Image (cartoon, rainbow, N blue to C red):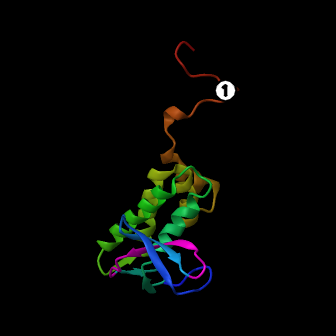
Amino acid sequence: MVCPVCGGDDCRVVDTRASGDGIRRRRVCQDCEHRFTTFERIELRLPLVVKSDGKREPFLRDKVLMGLSLACRKRPVAAEAIEQAAVRVEQAVMTAGAEISSEDIGRRVLDELKTLDKVAFVRFASVYLDVQSPIEFLDLIAPLVEPASVEPTSGEPSTGEGA
């Protein structure tokens, strides 16, 4: 293992723990004494992603994680929740077979974001679904808004009983 600070290759493991889908190792560089963490995961034979233009490329979990993280940026969503959502998307991709469309992956990410954070969902969906107009935004947001949570503004008459 190469030290990320000094580039030395004399590092030793000081702690090893199971971590979800892999192993977390705490290491220390023998040259500069810098401590750092590495993660080991089992390399799985992941399916190819079929892009909208027909090109095929290997599935990269980090792309999913980056998309989720970007959508949840500055939102009250725990990093662990984002990580678990990425794991669920990856597991779904693994069961899809030898190939999966990028559209299917995007839909799975949207489903995860819908349960994590509604604003993050709208952020991701507006880019992923290529929203071009305010009407399209309204169509996107309408299913997320609960009728009971919408209150009239102070200038509008109430429609309550006895009116």
**Element carrying mark 1:** loop
Question: What residue lies at 53% left-to-right and 67% top-to-bottom?
Answer: 67
Q: Is residue 16 visible?
A: yes
Can residue 52 be seen here? Answer: no
**Image location of residue 143, percent across then percent down:** 48, 47
Label 1 Cα neighbours within 10 Å, binned few <14 / some 14-19 / many ≥20: few
Please, is residue 37 above or below residue 115 in the view?
below
Quadrant hosting residue 16: bottom left
**In the image, residue 150 lies at what x, y percent?**
56, 34
Instruction: Check residue 79 for magenta coloring.
Output: no
Q: Quadrant of the C terminus?
A: top right
Q: Which residues are magenta?
A: 31-45
Q: Is residue 120 above or below residue 13?
A: above
**Residue named by callout 1:** 156
Percent x, y of residue 52: 47, 79
Q: Judge whether residue 36 is colored magenta.
A: yes
Q: Residue at x 55, y 71 (%)?
A: 35
Describe residue 46's horizontal placement relative to residue 150 as left or right.
left
Residue displayed at 35% across by 68% down: 21
In this rendering, would 87 be left or right of 121?
left
Query: Which one is nearer the viewer's eye here, 114 or 157?
Result: 114
Extreme-top residue of the structure: 162
Badge 1 amino acid: Glu
Where is 107 relative to 160, above or below?
below
- Decide if residue 34 is on the left or right side of residue 106: right
Q: Residue at x 66, y 26 (%)?
A: 156
Position of residue 74 measured from the top left corner of the image (x, y, whole percent): 62, 54
Image quadrant where residue 40 sits: bottom left
Q: Nearer the viewer, residue 108 or 138?
A: 108
* Viewer-proximal residue among 102 and 62: 62
